[in-house]
Amino acid sequence: MRIISILKKSLKEQLRNFWIVLLSLSMGPFFIFVYYLINESSTPQYKVIVVNNDAGINANGQTQNKGRELFSFFKQTNTLSENLSFTLSEMTDREAAVAKLKNKDADALVVIPSGFSAALSYDSIVGAPKLEFVGDLTSANYLLSAVWANEVVNEYARGITHTKRIIEVAETPLGSSGTINQFDMLVPGILIVSLIMLLFTASIAFVSEVENKTIMRLKLSKITILDFLGGVGAVQFLLGIAGMLLTLLTAVLLGFEYQGSLVAMLVIASLCCLSLIAFSLIVAAVTKSANEVLVVGNFPMFLFMFFTGAAFPIKSDAWFYIAGYPVNLQALLSPTHAISALNKIFIMDLPFGHVFPELIAIAVLTLLYFAIGAYLFHKRHLKS
């Protein structure tokens, strides 16, 4: 069969391009290692400053300062959940504390008012004490610190006033999201990054036939476009799966806790591979040499890496919905759906049936990429 001959030839050509193969296989593990080092060196530290302006009260001949008691209670309850802990410090000058917030030396400031003890005394006619929270409202660290501080203050006040908690909130994490760390959250996206590198290797594999003039012999042999694409694409498919498995192995060795079905991951990866190979045909159709691929291919590569959630999380509003599945600008890029599917498998620990919408979206985009790429490639490089 002609497709077998093309496959063998493409495999030999790929092995000759040692550095391109090495780049494709090593990019995923490299990103995994870099993000692991970043995560290890920047473990979240939540720093809260408390300024106690409480004047205290005299009760039964003794001075009581419930602001100091609250600070001690803060130190005893310095965790919000298993993965979130907080560092407490006390200052006397509010302005100096605000300056630390502005310099990012702290995440949140809690200011205890002067009448705090009086407001919590049994015979008090003073209204409810008003604590002040200060921080950058756009900062996730501040939001987490404020949630924790608010919970601690309410728990302390409840103990002082001997009141019942009106509402009990039970938090139920989805899948493993309650115990997963920042590194584990990044792994699904980096796995797709290892596949995105196929944009270069596959495009170069297609266009090298044109650059080396071997496309002329292929045309004389009456080869069909499907035989040509099948033979070259099969080698790129194997290269992509090998790169993804190597990336996953690197992540596991660095502590990634693998969950979900490996078969489901391979199905998702396989469809994503096919879509990227199909898209690389479009890149090959508009270029004439490997050098042009290295220039032109950077644009779609950055789109796929930075606008699909592969390198970092990103989300945009939906234009419309199809059977409840959102369609937006990112939905036109197949890695978006592959990352969503991997997150459902790895993070949410959902069964395989829940990723069918993503698989259908990838399959539709693959056919669209292939139709456009095959038409353009045939018209420019294969047509007599």
Image: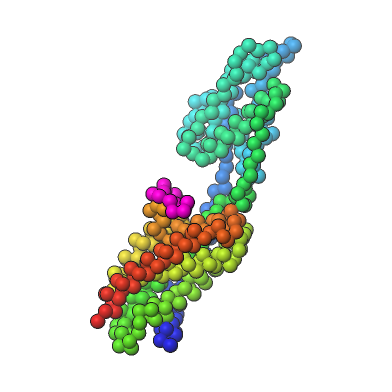
- Counting from the top left corner in percent of width and height, residue 371 is at 35, 69
Question: Does 44 appear above or below 226?
Answer: above
- Judge left or right: residue 110 versus residue 286: right
**Most distant residue in the right direction:** 60
The x and y percentages for residue 8 are 44, 84
Please give the name of the residue rendered at 51% of the width and 70% of the height, measured from the top-left corner: 241
Q: Residue furthest front?
A: 323
Image-quadrant location for residue 301? bottom left
**Residue at the image position 65 percent from the left and 44 percent from the top:** 82
Outermost residue toward the left in this view: 384
Query: Which of 165/51 is in front?
Result: 165
Q: Which residue is at a point 42% across and 84% down the rendered structure image?
A: 3
Q: Residue 328 vs residue 112: left or right?
A: left
| Count of picture labels | 0
* Spot occupied by residue 229 in the image (x, y as percentages of width and height): 39, 77
To which quarter of the image does residue 15 belong? bottom left
Quadrant placement of the N terminus: bottom left
Q: Is residue 190 visible?
A: no
Write down the region rendered in magenta: 311-326
Whether residue 218 is in magenta: the answer is: no
Q: 5 or 246, which is in the foreground? A: 5
